[in-house]
Amino acid sequence: MRSGPFPGAPVAGFWAALGFLTILPVPEREAERGSATATIFFPWIGLGLGALAALVARMPVDPLVAGSLALATHFFVTGGLHWDGWADVLDATLGPALSREKRVSILADPRIGAHAAVGVALLAVLAVSALARAPFWGIVLGAVTGRWVMVASLRWAPALRSSGAAAGLRAHARPVGAGVGLAAVVALCLVRAVAPGSLAVAFGVGVVVAAAFATFLVRRLGGMNGDAHGAVGLLAETVVWLVAAETTGGTA
């Protein structure tokens, strides 16, 4: 192992990110050592997740079947990590006028309410439709953008609590460092002659929608926890898929 100011940190950070964002087995000792650099690798994990989903979505079967299988694969590999957060924040923020304290208590309630059930169903339908039609680059870009957005919200949104997984990651969130992975994916897309305008529109709409949703959550809850960051990332990912599908007509 090389010596230096952060010996082994890049590799450990990768393992930490992989262990946090997926159910794949990782070396526990390395993952623990890499917590300070984990967020840098979030977009790179998104690259792998997006490529896997895109490959499944290209299966030679009915497009809606392929899209459903792609979402199921994505859900399985991530352990549905952000879907529970999406459900929780919808129940907490879309209900009738409540005090901020009551909304935060609903956020911590594991039970599923009507807003969560409908919201999860709607997002799943939109995701399947998008995966069935989006080009390969759009699916990959969506997965990468969603993970970068999570790093950005960890860094810039106020924390809901001073403890927990999100608080630990927030202290080391590095959206600029994570942006290297995002930039690499954009560069790969351009090398494949993807229209820069399509890239910019898909990414831009995804980030704008995510920022608006994060602002809404902060105003309703007073801050963001892990569920909220996951929900923002999931929404950004799905929006990029949808925009890519609508603007390219499913062409690679």
Image (spheres, rainbow, N blue to C red):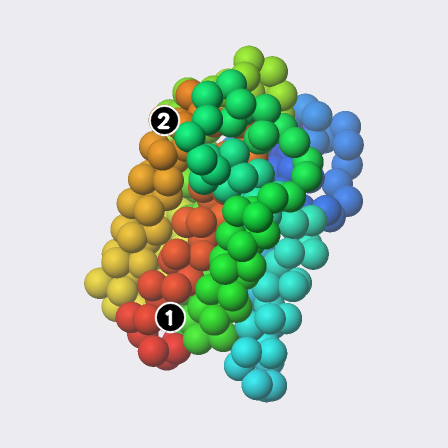
The residue nearer to you, when weighing 201 against 25, is 201
Which residue corresponds to the image point at 42% horizontal and 21% vertical from the top-left? 222
Residue type, label 1: Ala
| Residue at the spot of label 1 | 245
Q: Residue furthest front?
A: 96
The image quadrant where one finds the C terminus is bottom left
Which residue corresponds to the image point at 60% horizontal and 16% vertical from the top-left? 163
Q: Secondary structure at mark 2?
A: helix
The residue nearer to you, when weighing 109 against 236, is 109
Q: Is residue 114 above or below residue 249?
A: above
- In the image, which disc is placed on residue 219? 2
Which residue corresponds to the image point at 55% horizontal and 78% vertical from the top-left? 64
Give the mark toward the camera: 2 or 1. 2
Which residue corresponds to the image point at 64% horizontal and 43% vertical from the top-left? 112
- In the image, which disc is placed on residue 82? none
In which quadrant of the rendered view does residue 169 lie? top right
Q: Gap in Å between the C-alphas at discs 2 and 1? A: 31 Å
The image quadrant where one finds the N terminus is top right
Residue 240: give x, y in percent of width and height: 38, 58
- Number of marks in the rendered image: 2
Q: Of label 2 and label 1, which has the lower sequence position?
A: 2
Residue 180: give x, y in percent of width and height: 40, 41
The answer to whether any part of residue 12 appears in the image is no
Q: Is residue 56 above or below residue 88?
A: below
Residue type, label 2: Arg
Q: Quick check: marks 2 and 1 in contact, CB under 8 Å?
A: no
Q: Secondary structure at mark 1?
A: helix
Q: Residues within 10 Å of mark 1 (few under 14, many from 20)?
A: many
